[in-house]
Image: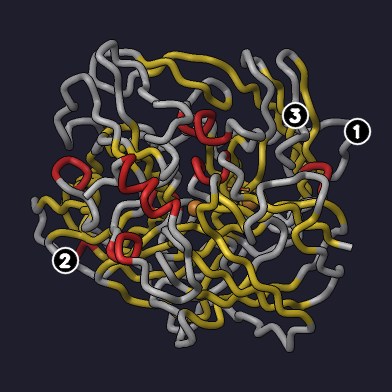
């Protein structure tokens, strides 16, 4: 079922009572409006899975203790549909952008040059970053100029990602391809798979025009619920295929879609053993048959392909999709190898936070535009001003699907609708999936830096249509 304009406006005009069932929203599985491609869809499972290149760090005399990188945002053409070329906006001209790998606690400095025809700003999602380098939506870099972003990365090893965060244009800019992985690592000597059996998977959905270009509807009533594509891309390739040995692999799953939620599972089924979340390793592994992933969430999972026969074809499916969007990618299982990896019963220590000194409530709902506490984004007026070092409980209530992200502070989910956290809420999070009429409580500690940050919905159309708030750490 899709959100038709009439239905959407119908619910939007109504009053949302907290906790009350809203008939349309409560049953909605869709998180946006699917845009139909105007060109035949590519045949699934023909393209090999691309893995974005890892950038080599350099050095710079002004930053003697840092890994130094230069990245240029540019317009480029890329083969996404077989035999055709599509214009993208990419970091170093590629989508996904290059992967950056940093050591935990090692300062990383990135000079970002904007060679695009529009101003942009880049955010490191999940980073504990000083405000000047966090990518506040109005800290724009004009075309043909550069900005230095400094990342101290005094934080746990984790799967972070970077992406465009331009005021009012984050959704189209991300759709064009401005996103990449930034992994933080250290020397933890866990026996989990590494090297070429540790693979980041960036899942996005896109639609294509008759000429093979990306099809994005622009801001309208048809896009306000969120833009969904009908082609599923992994690392920029439509429904790719990966040949694997009959052994364990670690996949760092990232839902980088503008608005689509996925319910991922393997077919034939085999466990997705979660070892990490947005903020790095869990305390202990968690076995799932399927994982629901909202926009911007990350799940590190280990899959043991020795559960399958050599020669078997395994599909990563999306149980929330229909037709083409019900499939994500294919894994072709090869021969076994001597697998020295394992998943230890203890992975890391997760400190518990608390007690909290302040509790705040945030209502995410449609009210002429997408709002938080009935307010539109205002860069100059904070929605909350937590004190540096304070621990706070934030309670989120929603009218629709919203994927709530807080900059700077990693958090832990305390409860969902007054009960235990859900199966996908474990560990340190920076983004939490709110479904229609849910109430989710999280506990966060605001450490690191004073200054101006944001929290927002990571359905990028909601974010651009004002569902964002300024957080001033004082
Ligand atoms: Cu991933 Cu404020 O964003
Ligand atoms: Cu962020
Ligand atoms: Cu939202």
Q: Residue at the location (54% across, 29% down)?
A: 173
Find numbered disc 3 in the image and state the secondary structure of the residue it sits on: loop
User: Would residue 424 appear left or right of 137 to someone viewing this image?
Assistant: left
Check disc 3 and report the residue beneath it. 140
Earlier residue among tags 2 and 3: 3
Q: Nearer the viewer, residue 199 or 58?
A: 199
Quarter of the image where one finds residue 40? top left
- Mark 2 — residue? 269
Can you tell which of label 2 and label 3 is closer to the viewer? 3
Q: Of circles 1 and 3, which is in front?
A: 3
Q: Position of residue 62 (x, y in %)?
A: 91, 33
Residue drawn where x is 74% and y is 73% of the image: 445
The residue that mark 1 highlights is: 62
For discs 1 and 2, the disc positioned in front in the rendered view:
2
Q: CA distance from mark 1 to mark 3?
A: 23 Å
Indicate the position of residue 29 as horizontal and vertical percent values.
29, 58
CA–CA distance between discs 2 and 3?
A: 46 Å
Which element type, helix, strand or loop, lies under badge 1?
Answer: loop
| Residue 175 pos. (x, y %) | 46, 31
On the image, the x and y values in percent for residue 343 come to 39, 74
Near mark 3 (Cα within 10 A), the count class, few <14, some 14-19 or many ≥20, is some
**SS category of the residue bearing label 2:** loop
Using the image, determine if residue 250 lies above or below residue 1: below
Upstream in sequence: badge 1 or badge 3: 1
Of callouts 1 and 2, which one flags the residue occurring earlier in the amino acid sequence?
Answer: 1
CB within 8 Å, label 1 to label 2 = no
Q: Characterize the local packing of mark 1: few (<14), some (14-19) or many (20 or more) Cα atoms within 10 angstroms.
A: few
Viewer-side residue, 204 vs 222: 222
């Amino acid at each position: 079922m899709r959100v038709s304009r009439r239905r959407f406006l119908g619910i939007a005009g109504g009053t949302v009572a907290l906790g009350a069932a809203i008939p349309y929203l409560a049953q909605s599985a869709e998180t946006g409006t699917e845009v139909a491609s105007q060109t035949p869809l590519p045949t699934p499972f023909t393209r090999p899975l691309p893995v974005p290149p890892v950038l080599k760090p350099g050095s710079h005399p002004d930053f003697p203790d840092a890994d130094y990188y230069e990245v240029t945002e540019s317009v480029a053409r890329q083969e996404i549909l077989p035999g055709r070329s599509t214009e993208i906006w990419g970091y170093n001209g590629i989508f996904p952008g290059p992967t950056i790998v940093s050591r935990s606690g090692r300062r990383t400095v990135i000079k970002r040059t904007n060679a695009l025809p529009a101003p942009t700003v880049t955010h490191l999602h999940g980073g504990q970053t000083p405000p000047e380098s966090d990518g506040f939506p109005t800290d724009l870099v004009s075309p043909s100029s550069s900005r230095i972003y400094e990342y101290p990365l005094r934080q746990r090893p984790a799967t972070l990602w970077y992406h465009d965060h331009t005021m009012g244009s984050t959704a189209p800019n991300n759709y064009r391809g401005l996103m990449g992985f930034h992994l933080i690592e250290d020397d933890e000597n866990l026996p989990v798979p590494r090297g070429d059996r540790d693979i980041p998977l960036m899942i996005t959905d896109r639609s294509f025009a008759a000429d093979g270009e990306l099809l994005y509807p622009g801001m309208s009533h048809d896009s306000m619920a969120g833009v969904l594509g009908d082609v599923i891309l992994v690392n920029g390739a439509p429904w790719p295929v990966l040949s694997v040995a009959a052994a364990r692999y670690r996949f760092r799953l990232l839902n980088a879609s503008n608005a689509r939620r996925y319910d991922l599972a393997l077919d034939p089924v085999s466990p997705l053993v979660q070892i990490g979340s947005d903020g790095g390793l869990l305390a202990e592994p968690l076995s799932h048959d399927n994982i629901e992933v909202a926009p911007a969430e990350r799940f590190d999972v280990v899959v043991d392909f020795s559960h399958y026969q050599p020669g078997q074809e395994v599909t990563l499916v999306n149980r929330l999709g229909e037709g083409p969007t019900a499939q994500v990618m294919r894994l072709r299982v090869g021969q076994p190898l001597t697998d020295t990896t394992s998943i230890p019963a203890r992975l890391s220590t997760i400190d518990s936070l608390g007690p909290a000194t302040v509790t705040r409530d945030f209502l995410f709902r449609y009210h002429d535009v997408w709002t938080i506490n009935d307010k539109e984004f205002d860069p100059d007026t904070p929605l909350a001003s937590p004190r540096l070092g304070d621990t706070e409980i934030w309670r989120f209530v929603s009218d629709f699907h919203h994927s709530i992200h807080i900059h700077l502070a990693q958090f832990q989910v305390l409860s969902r609708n007054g009960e235990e956290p859900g199966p996908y809420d474990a560990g340190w999070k920076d983004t939490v999936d709110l479904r229609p009429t849910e109430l989710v409580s999280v506990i966060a500690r605001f450490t690191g830096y004073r200054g101006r940050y944001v929290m927002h919905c990571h359905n990028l159309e909601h974010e651009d249509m004002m569902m964002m708030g300024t957080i001033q750490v004082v």
